[in-house]
Amino acid sequence: MQGRYGIDALGRFLIYSVMIFSLLNLLFGSLILFTLDLAIWSYAFYRVFSKDIYKRSMENNRYLNFKACISGKIKRFFNRFRQGGNASGDGSDECGQKFRSKCNSFSGKCYDDTYKVFKCPKCRQKLRVPRGKGKIMITCRRCQYEFIKRT
Ligand SMILES: [Zn+2]
């Protein structure tokens, strides 16, 4: 196992999902469940034996971020419930401030909904542009390269 990635939080989660799907598959015997099960299983195996440790740990980070995000949302939901519909949402939980804006489940990042971030195709400079403007011409502030993107 030397030089291999092994099992992390995401790996454990994948294995649990496989077990749940297998159980459901035993009960319902669905081809979709079976395929899904097989897919997750292969992905879990692939991760355990992967040599690209950096990439795997990035995936794990994204998973942990996403999990923190979801649990923060659930916590806030129940807090609101407890306060009798008085939605103050003080955001005192560890996730409250960080994940107040929209969460992207794939990148694991939470970003401000009113802006979109593009990378300059030429110099990779990150450029923030307002959303919902349709197709606009973006001028890179570093190298002055111009490109068109939909926001
Ligand atoms: Zn540029």
Image (spheres, rainbow, N blue to C red):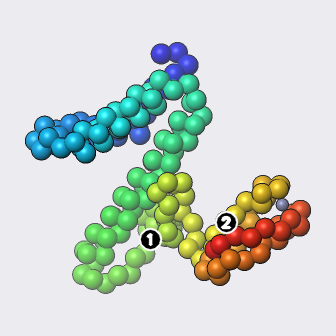
Left or right, residue 73 beside residue 51: left
Residue at the far front in the pictured view? 31
Residue 18 appears in the picture as rendered? yes
The image position of residue 147, as x and y in percent, is 78, 67
Q: Which residue is under mark 2?
A: 117
Residue 91, numbered label: 1
Q: Callout 1, which amino acid?
A: Gly
Give the secondary structure at mark 1: loop
Query: Measured along the vertical axis of the image, is residue 119 above or below residue 91?
Result: above
Question: Residue 135 or 84: which is nearer the viewer?
Answer: 135
Question: Which quadrant holds the C terminus?
Answer: bottom right
Residue name at image x 51 percent, y 70 percent = 101
Please determine whether, in this image, residue 88 is positioned above or below residue 127: below
Q: Along the polypeptide, which appears first: circle 1 or circle 2?
A: 1
- Mark 2, Cα crowd under 10 Å, few <14 / some 14-19 / many 20+, is some
How far apart in space, not on screen, are marks 1 and 2 (Cα)?
25 Å
Place of residue 132 in the rendered image (x, y in percent of width and height, measured from the top left):
60, 80
Q: Looking at mark 2, is its residue's CB closer than 8 Å to ligand 1? A: no
Q: Is residue 32 above or below residue 105?
A: above
The answer to which quarter of the image holds residue 9 is: top left
Where residue 74 sits in the image (x, y, percent)? 32, 64
Check the image and name the residue furthest to the bottom: 86
Numbered circle sitting on residue 72: none
